[in-house]
Amino acid sequence: MRATDHLDDERLRLLFSDACRPGGLFRVADVVRAERVNQGNFSSWKNGNYPGSLASVAAARRFANRFFASHELPRDFARAEQRELGAPTTLDIATWNVKNLGAATPIERKQRIGALLGSFSLVVAQEIRRTDLRAIIDERLFDVAQLEPSGSASRRESLAFVYRRDALELVSSRLLESPRHDFDFRYAPAEAVFRVRATGRRLVVVNVHVSASLDDKSLELDALAALLRAYAADTQLLVAGDFNVEPSHAAFRAWRRDGLRPALECGATTVALEPHCYDALWLRNADESAEWAAARTVSYDDMLDRRSRASRRRFIKDVSDHLPVTMTLDYGARSRSRQTTTDDEC
């Protein structure tokens, strides 16, 4: 008897329906967290128990294929559900330094990173070196804007944007130059302009990796502030990345005066005995239809025990030395609020 036989088809449909919404089935990390799931222990998964190591993307797809084959659900259930739901109005946005993801990176780690990238509507990623992210994501649901590498002769990296096709449409992407003649960025910031499919509105995202080797980070942060002032006041602007300084740094006062606010004032984003709050999402919310909330650091408690030196070392080796910082940008909250008010009046 299969592990799923004791569940009626409607219950299975509901379970997978929840999983397939933005944040679901092919956001593989949320569904397949343990090798045991791939061996048919569906009851463990449905109860939310995700012990053990993260399964590979291939293993997750095998599990999904077996499920679909045995229950006669649409092969691409995520897209079928999306056609009924329309474009998602809620975006789960993250910034993540994936730590030197390069040609020599073991395939297992690449697959693990690819699965975790699929946990969000949009990931602003740093430290991609000689790796095409399209090779490790599910291209049926996601696409990538990966910019040309920049940096020094000895260390070059790409910045990238991984986004859900059903939520966002890429309008343009480019590398940005320093607006100051006396300063050049070590890693050129990258800009991506998206159209939010649910509303048709634009979202401008700037991807930043401030050089850790720069003694005075104020130089780069001031140059970034000058660059960001070039955007019109009514631009929905998100600046995300690894800043290698805390949001409380004095240079960010200019950012705050210009209307930018960090989604999270502080949260341990580096995997170290003494962690730092180096990764951040800064938003200037010029779109009255959008609300932002639920900012947090993704702790991956099933894979990382910060109290354990061995666990930290294993996570750095197998995943990254940074954790994602995520927030929710909700383009439907205010319309839902107005609808609730109307219903109450009726």
Image (spheres, rainbow, N blue to C red):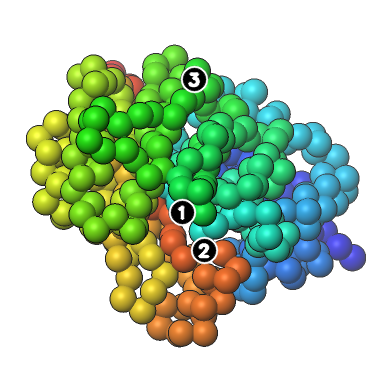
Placement of the C terminus among the 4 image quadrants: top left
Q: Position of residue 101 (x, y in %)?
A: 59, 55
The residue singled out by tag 1 in the image is 97
Q: Position of residue 90 (x, y in %)?
A: 43, 34
Crowd rating for badge 3 (residues with CA inside 10 Å; few <14, some 14–19, many 20+): few
**Taking 265 as reference, is 252 above or below it?**
above
Dot 2 and dot 3 residues touching (CB under 8 Å): no
The residue singled out by tag 3 in the image is 172
Crowd rating for badge 2 (residues with CA inside 10 Å; few <14, some 14–19, many 20+): many
Asked whether 346 or 227 is in front, the reply is 227
- Residue 68 in sight from this viewpoint: yes
The residue singled out by tag 2 in the image is 320
Q: Position of residue 132 (x, y in %)?
A: 66, 42
Amino acid type, residue under disc 1 in the picture: Asn
Q: Secondary structure at mark 3?
A: strand
Real-space Cα distance between discs 2 and 3?
Answer: 29 Å
Q: Secondary structure at mark 2?
A: loop
